[in-house]
Image (tube, grey):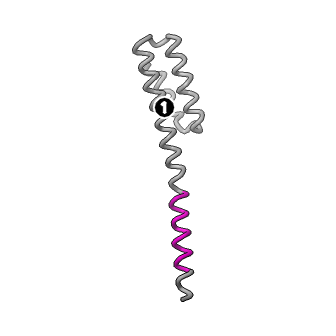
Amino acid sequence: MARFPRIFCVAVLTAVALVGSSLPARGDEKCERKIREAEAKLHEAVERHGENSKQARKRRDQLEDARRRCGDRHEDHHDMDHDHL
């Protein structure tokens, strides 16, 4: 009988740990999605209006904002965007 509370506690702690560890991953996925969307919009603006257009500059700023909000985890991609556009 004393074994049940111990097993129950371990099961609850395991469940909490699993749920807690998946929350940052969802946040990362949301950040990745926002950055991909901003990159696509930048590419579209460059294709439609030119690399140095005001539309492209606006989209670059939005991409930078998205990256900043995600904690600058994507800094290594920053240089690639400016080199290839």
Name the amino acid, label 1. His
Q: Nearer the viewer, residue 27 or 83?
A: 27
Q: Check residue 7 for magenta coloring.
A: yes
Number of disc labels: 1
Picture residue at 50% right of the left edge, 10% below the top: 53
Q: Check residue 68 for magenta coloring.
A: no
Reply above or below: 14 against 43: below
Provide residue 63's location: percent of width, then percent of height.
53, 27
- The secondary element bearing badge 1 is classed as helix
> Tag 1: Cα neighbours inside 10 Å, few (<14), some, or many (≥20)?
few
Picture residue at 52% right of the left edge, 21% below the top: 60
Q: Nearer the viewer, residue 8 or 49?
A: 8
Residue bounds of the magenta highlight: 6-20
Reply above or below: 17 against 41: below
Picture residue at 54% right of the left edge, 33% below the top: 75
The residue pinned by badge 1 equals 77
Picture residue at 56% right of the left edge, 27% below the top: 64
Provide residue 10's location: percent of width, then percent of height.
54, 74
Quadrant location of the C terminus in the rendered image: top left
